[in-house]
Image (spheres, rainbow, N blue to C red):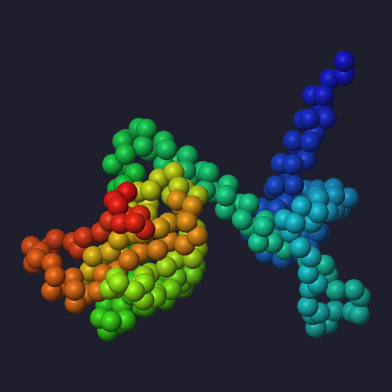
Amino acid sequence: MKSTGAPSSATGEAAGTRGHVARLILELGPCTAATLGGRLGLTPAAIRRHLDNLLADGMIETRMARAQRGRGRGRPARLFAITDAGRSAFEHAYDDLAAGALRFLAETSGPQAVTEFARHQLADLESRYAPVVAAAPAEQRVQALAQALSADGYAASATSTPAGRAGTQLCQHHCPVAHVAAQFPELCEAETEVFGRLLGTPVQRLATIARGDGVCTTHVSDRSLAAGGAPDRPRGQEPMTGTRSPEGSSI
């Protein structure tokens, strides 16, 4: 029986080198095969082989460099750039690392440490959004928050709630931490708390991408109803926040 150890080892080594090539393209942006080969110490034949495999897998794509002044009439340089699929593959790898770090934190310091970490991570977001939201008229603050979230890549929008329920729905169509939040809902809970403080009114999370929903949806209570229908809160007490299912039962 022939041993398969050598081929398996060679295959693993090739895959590792291919990953280094893809990562370098991600870091450098569109670049030539010569640049990649020189940085990684690979022969022209070797770098071409790895690039061909990455192209076949849809991880990278080719582009033609713009002609530069003073350059001859030769063929434009062929550049290699990362694709959305390639970028996504690296994002998932980072997600796995982040999830592993949070799991270690929970095991060594307890679940509360994860909650504190989530709140700490969102503190910067809250400090950046606070002046933007506060500057908007009261009736436009949810829209202002949606615009701030969209600028950070959350593809957010604000819409009126369905008939029979006063308020506004804040929808996030993209979540950069959905993979991690699926394992650690503390991230979603901390974000909901931030929304409540920024808007100064009760909010309830109705759906999350992390739980398999298509959109992260947060119900924002009408400010006038919140002020007139709820008992006065002691000074310093935060607006009520929570995570609820679409049927209204607490999760």
Q: Please name the residue shown 81% across and 72% down the image.
A: 64
Q: Position of residue 7 (x, y in %)?
A: 83, 30
Q: Please name the residue shown 65% across and 61% down the image.
A: 84
Task: Identify which residue, 202 or 45, lies in the foreground.
Answer: 202
Q: Where is residue 23 in the image (x, y as percent from the top left)?
A: 66, 53
* Residue projecting furthest to the front: 164
**Quarter of the figure that contains the N terminus:** top right
Task: Identify which residue, 226 or 188, lies in the foreground.
Answer: 226
Task: Identify which residue, 181 or 218, lies in the foreground.
Answer: 218
Left or right of residue 115: residue 11: right
Q: Please name the residue shown 32% across and 81% down the image.
A: 140
Left or right of residue 99: residue 62: right
Left or right of residue 181: residue 90: right
Q: Position of residue 116 (x, y in %)?
A: 29, 48
Residue 54 visible in this rendered orientation of the protein: no
Left or right of residue 184: residue 27: right
